[in-house]
Amino acid sequence: EVQLVESGGGLIQPGGSLRLSCAASGFAVSNNYMNWVRQAPGKGLEWVSVIYSEGSTYYADSVKGRFTISRDNSKNTLNLQMNSLRVEDTAVYYCARGRFPWTAAFDIWGQGTVVIVS
Amino acid sequence: QSALTQPRSVSGSPGQSVTISCTGTSSDVGGYNYVSWYQQHPGKAPKLMIYDVTKRPSGVPDRFSGSKSGNTASLTISGLQAEDESDYYCCSYADNYVVLFGGGTKLTVL
């Protein structure tokens, strides 16, 4: 079964760091365009970052320089290292697979992991 | 990087049609045929409903359709059903390899 399962969320103080992981099953993260999308409480979806199959990475302006997306091919996981966290980073963080070919459409989503910065 | 503009809410009666608009710029919606739409029920992950402006993934009813004119994309739901009541988000590829979402639209089935 094709599935994504996020982990690593929690309560963290402003200025702190947190590392999120997303375990994939049924497909290889290395062959796909993998993304993080977040949703603040009661708010809409916000794209955070993407890692292309060939390794290029891109970020939303709101997290550039603070967040780093990466993948571990041996564990088939996607990661998001979040540093210098701010109160406004509080959200549910989803990992999502980009459809192939990549046209910024997300066909598989995880259930989300909650990050609270307070 | 500004969010795409959607109406905050729309409503319709069962059997009717509703259309949700999504307005961007020539740097996103207008510049690429890469608009997608998502349905999100409370407490759930989003679900892909439309991609590449007009295409439906397998399993999505043909009551859902997408279109685009200039810098505005639209999602039309025909033959409204009670289970269509949800939040809907548009999304577009944009210049400089980024992705933008709309603010979301709450659909109420009266």
Image: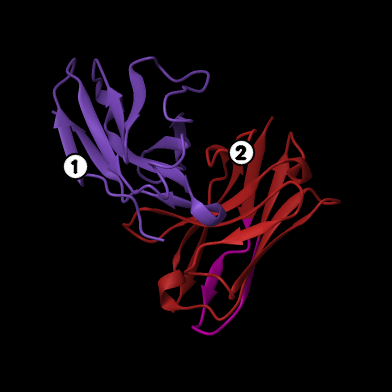
Q: Which residues are magenta?
A: A7-20
Q: Secondary structure at mark 2?
A: loop
Using the image as rendered, state which of residue A19 and residue B78 is in the foreground. B78
The x, y position of residue A113, in whole percent, is: 54, 57
Q: Secondary structure at mark 1?
A: strand
Q: Amino acid at mark 2?
A: Trp
Q: Residues within 10 Å of mark 1 (few under 14, many from 20)?
A: few
Rendering quarter of residue A58: bottom right
Labels 1 and 2 touching (C-beta < 8 A): no
Task: Output the letter for the chain in red.
Answer: A
Side of A22 where B29 appears, left or right: left
The x, y position of residue A103, in whole percent, is: 55, 38
Query: Which residue sits at x=59%, y=75%?
Result: A65
The x, y position of residue A76, in whole percent, is: 78, 48
Question: Relative to residue A110, is residue B75 depicted above or below?
Answer: above
Q: Disc 1 marks which residue?
A: B9
Q: Residues within 10 Å of mark 2 (few under 14, many from 20)?
A: some
Task: Output the letter for the chain in purple.
Answer: B
Q: Amino acid at mark 1?
A: Ser
For the residues beneath circles 1 and 2, the answer to whether they share a chain is no
Using the image as rendered, state which of residue A104 and residue B77 is in the foreground. A104
Side of A88 where B75 appears, left or right: left
Q: Disc 2 marks which residue?
A: A102
- What is the chain letter for disc 1? B
User: Which quarter of the rendered picture does the N terminus of chain A lie within?
Assistant: top right
Question: Residue furthest toward the bottom?
Answer: A15
Asked if residue A24 is among those painted magenta in the image, a careful observer would answer no
User: Which quarter of the rendered picture does the C terminus of chain A lie within?
Assistant: bottom left
